Amino acid sequence: MSTLTYILLFTFIGSVGALIGGMALLANKRFALRISHFLASFAAGTLLGTAFFDLLPEASEAAEKTHTDVFLWTLIGLIFFFFIERSIHWFHHHEEDDDLKHAEEKKSALPLIIIGDTVHNFIDGIVIAATFMVNVPLGVVTTLAVFAHEVPQEIGDFGLMLHKGMRRKNIILVNVISAAVSFAGAIMTYVVGNIFQNYIAIFLSLTAGFFIYIASSDILPEIHKENRKRHAILESFLLVLGIFVIWYGISLLEPR
């Protein structure tokens, strides 16, 4: 097979294939809705784990070649999402009753989740293509690493979107489109070669900022707001589990 064929095939496996877990979750709507709140805790853990154990270390490694300030761009990503969310609130929260306002607040994080996941998939496509352009075995290992951390994250994201009130068919459509963006990153990297890779540290840092903001500003406060005391221990456990799953998957497939 040609290098491009390898890139396209394994990009599909790494990004689109990772949706299988989320789709399996949605197969049982009643069960999925029942555990969506718990999956929100798991999603927060996977987002934080991905940011601190995957994106930031990768950004720091890439920054050594380009002298990029990783922490500056992470902060820019966090602040950028703050302004996006503020704009959403400004457009939707004028003179609303409390119930409607709470419903809008619950849904306002959806665009942030989708944007962050889409940028992340775009970066995955870049990374997969770049490694296959070095050699095939490295590309295969990288794809396995991408798949390993995408599966738990996608399951968490699917549950989180359900918890936010999004319809199942819309969740599937949005996630398929978001995952398909990885092909754009892969193809662009294949076409322009090393030029595009000069900016990968910035993309990784921005996405880390996005994920940290989504987890800490939207998901965790909402979990606290629910205030279900009997579920507190399980929610806390799932948060830590989400972090652990990402850490273990990355340490297993990408030993440093």
Image (tube, helix red, strand yellow):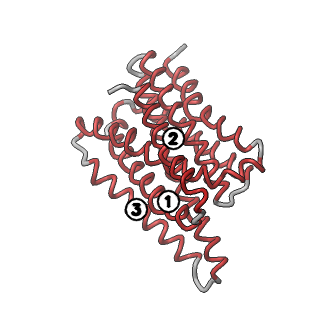
The reply to whether residue 41 is in sight is yes
- Mark 3 or 1: the one toward you: 1
> Residue 253 is drawn in which quadrant?
top left
Crowding around mark 3 (Cα neighbors within 10 Å: few <14, some 14 to 19, many 20+) is: some
Label 2: which residue? 121
- Point out residue 106 in the picture as x, y percentages from the top left corner: 60, 66
Vertical order, 169 against 180 (above or below): below
Q: Earlier in the sequence, mark 3 or mark 1?
A: 3
Q: Which element is circle 2 on?
A: helix
For the residues bearing labels 2 and 1, Cβ distance under 8 angstroms: no
Label 3: which residue? 80
Vertical order, 112 against 139 (above or below): below
Question: Which sits in the foreground, 193 or 28?
Answer: 28
Q: Quadrant of the N terminus?
A: top right
What's the CA distance linking mark 2 and mark 1?
A: 23 Å
Horizontal side of 13 relative to 193 (left or right) equals right
The reply to whether residue 191 is in sight is no
Q: Quadrant of the C terminus?
A: top left
- Point out residue 92 in the picture as x, y percentages from the top left corner: 59, 76
Q: Which element is circle 3 on?
A: helix
Picture disc at residue 220 = 1
What's the CA distance linking mark 3 and mark 2?
A: 19 Å
- Point out residue 144 in the picture as x, y percentages from the top left corner: 50, 25
Question: Which sits in the foreground, 159 or 82?
Answer: 159
**Who's the residue at 44% across and 59% down the image?**
216
**Who's the residue at 39% across and 53% down the image?**
209
Q: Earlier in the sequence, mark 2 or mark 1?
A: 2
Crowding around mark 1 (Cα neighbors within 10 Å: few <14, some 14 to 19, many 20+) is: some
Q: Earlier in the sequence, mark 3 or mark 2?
A: 3
As shown in the figure, which amino acid type bears the numbered disc 2?
Asn
Vertical order, 142 against 113 (above or below): above
Picture disc at residue 138 = none
